[in-house]
Amino acid sequence: MRVRSATRMSRGSGLALVMVSTLVAGLLGVALVDRSIRSSRTAAWGREHLVARMLAGSVADATYLDLQEMANIPGSSLYEALRQGGVGTAGAPSVPVAMTLPAIITPVVEEQAKVLGATITPSLAVSLRGLSTPHFDPEGRIGVVVVDVVIEVTGRPLAVTERLTVERAVRVSKVTAPFPLDQVGLLVMKTSKRDLARFKGKPALATTSRAPRTLLELMTTEGADGLQILPVEARKQVGNALRRVEAAALRTKAHFVVKSGQELDALIRPLLAQGKAVHGVVHVDSRGPEDVTRLELPVFRGRCLISVTGPVVVGDIRLEDPARDSLTIVSQDRVLVIGREVHASIVALSKEKGGLAFQQRAVIRGSLICQTFPAAVGLSSDEFGGCQFGGSAVAAVAASSHVAILAPHPLAIRTNQEGEE
Amino acid sequence: MNPTKIRRRVTAVTLVEVLVSVCVMGATGVLLLGLLGQGNRGTARAGEVQLAVSLGARSMDVLLAQGFSGLAPRGGRDSSLMLGKMGPGRPDPAADPTKLVLDGVTFMGWCQFVTVKPGILRVNVTIMWEGVRGTERVSGVLPLVRLMADPGHGMSLRTPARGGAA
């Protein structure tokens, strides 16, 4: 009886056990393979995200350069958008800027798509936000340029989307003297009996002209071709303009601030030596009256206003291309001109006698604004009378008086991956 | 019924079961071993790719932190990356600092800087790995590219000669 029961229990049960074991082992094997596949997908996903992140950063950087160029080309979308009237404060709707993907990105995208064996689709959107006129610079503009980049990687088991948003400040600043100072050939704010007695202490003005005129001609010619008394109705405007070239105002509006004449030299000379241009408002916080800033630039290219709190010595300055270059020098202290050819406008704000002095018979091809009548240092009266001023009309019209510069470093960077807000 | 006949029938069925079981288990075992091997290789490969991604990302971050002015002068030359210092634990002072060896796989990397146009530097980072796992030779390469702009370019850009007031 016991044998019969054992026989009944063992019939077919061995095979069933094996089948069940096989099934369990099979499931374990499938689970292991599935885990392996998931690991591979995760690793590939990580690689694709890294590639997408690099591409997004590349698009943002290349776009920054293109935008910087566009910002100063009349007729371009960013140029026009920056210079229109203020579109509101932060929070107001942003202004879209028409922009195509930088050409330099295409070969990089193709290369990386080949490496991944996927399709990479970059897209770009640029807008201007918070464009307004700052209180410290009524002739300028400030705003924020927002660059949105989306990189999509498809054709792989897991699609990847990488988003990058970069915000940079942009500032449009006038790099010539403020209006109406940029319209003058020579302006002396306070005359005296020793120089222009007939003006009886009132400001004297000579308008700009195509060709420079000698000091003697300006002093002896009556009427529009010579020095005239600054009209009363224009004095308030001139006074306001002079306040906008004071140190505090220029420091606030400056794109770059350096701490001495040497630092200024270290900033601009290497750029000029490399054939590059110098744009923007550069403010020099001189260490004191003994920190003299020397400006001798045989070839200057760019559109620049250099503001110096201390004394300045001006040597020869020549513009590479007067049609697109301009230089304005503003000093809160004394200015000594030792060069013969100075293709720059000079604003000397020292109220001391001899705040602006000439050591050479010079030609100033630009506006000359000073608080007191220019003085001669070691010059005969003939030589001093032969100094020429004005002749900036051509340059003032041809060269743009404003420069737009995007901040070198972003205000904010935001990244988003798919599924994130 | 004759008990002897019954016992004989049970023995014949059990042998068939054993044979079938052996075949099934053998086939399953072979399949499972194959899957195990493939799974291991896949997981190991995924680990290599993940490590390469991590090394590539870290190398790129270290390079980008030097800024345009720090990298531009190095243009045109290939430089080895110090991957040996990026591995787990304290690096062996006697080991080659340009190589990271983990689980029999050696990771190496190079960087190169090319000025593609004024103001834009192309940073190339390549992570390569090779080694032997068991009897199998493994290798891979991960190339990364990043374009980097000169932040001071805005100050020095030479715009075309088109005038006009703002």
Image (tube, grey):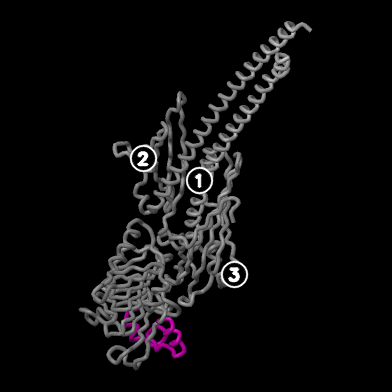
Whether marks 2 and 3 lie on the same chain:
no
Specify the subunit that label 2 lies on: B
**CB under 8 Å between discs 1 and 2:** no
Read off the magenta span.
A213-242
Front position among marks 2 and 3: 2
Residue type beneath disc 3 = Ala
Quadrant showing the N terminus of chain A: top right
Is residue B77 visible from the viewing direction of this image? no
Coordinates of residue B32 in the picture (x, y in percent): 58, 25
Determine the secondary structure under disc 2: helix
- Name the residue carrying label 3: A92
Front position among marks 1 and 2: 2
Give the left or right position of residue A354, taking residue B64 as reference. left
Determine the secondary structure under disc 1: helix
Can you name the residue that lies furthest to the front here? A1
Residue at mark 3 to residue at mark 1: CA–CA distance: 34 Å
Disc number placed over residue A50 in the picture, else none: 1
Q: For the point 60% across and 18% down, which residue is it?
A: B26
Residue type beneath disc 2 = Gly
Q: Residues within 10 Å of mark 2 (few under 14, many from 20)?
A: many
Residue at mark 2 to residue at mark 3: CA–CA distance: 51 Å
Task: Work out whether mark 3 precedes mark 1 in sequence or the reverse, and give the earlier one.
Answer: 1
- Name the residue carrying label 2: B84
Specify the subunit that label 3 lies on: A
Q: Residues within 10 Å of mark 1 (few under 14, many from 20)?
A: some
Up-down: is B134 above or below B109? Answer: above
Specify the subunit that label 1 lies on: A
Front position among marks 3 and 1: 1
Whether marks 3 and 1 lie on the same chain:
yes
As rendered, which of A387 and A87 lies closer to the eye?
Answer: A87
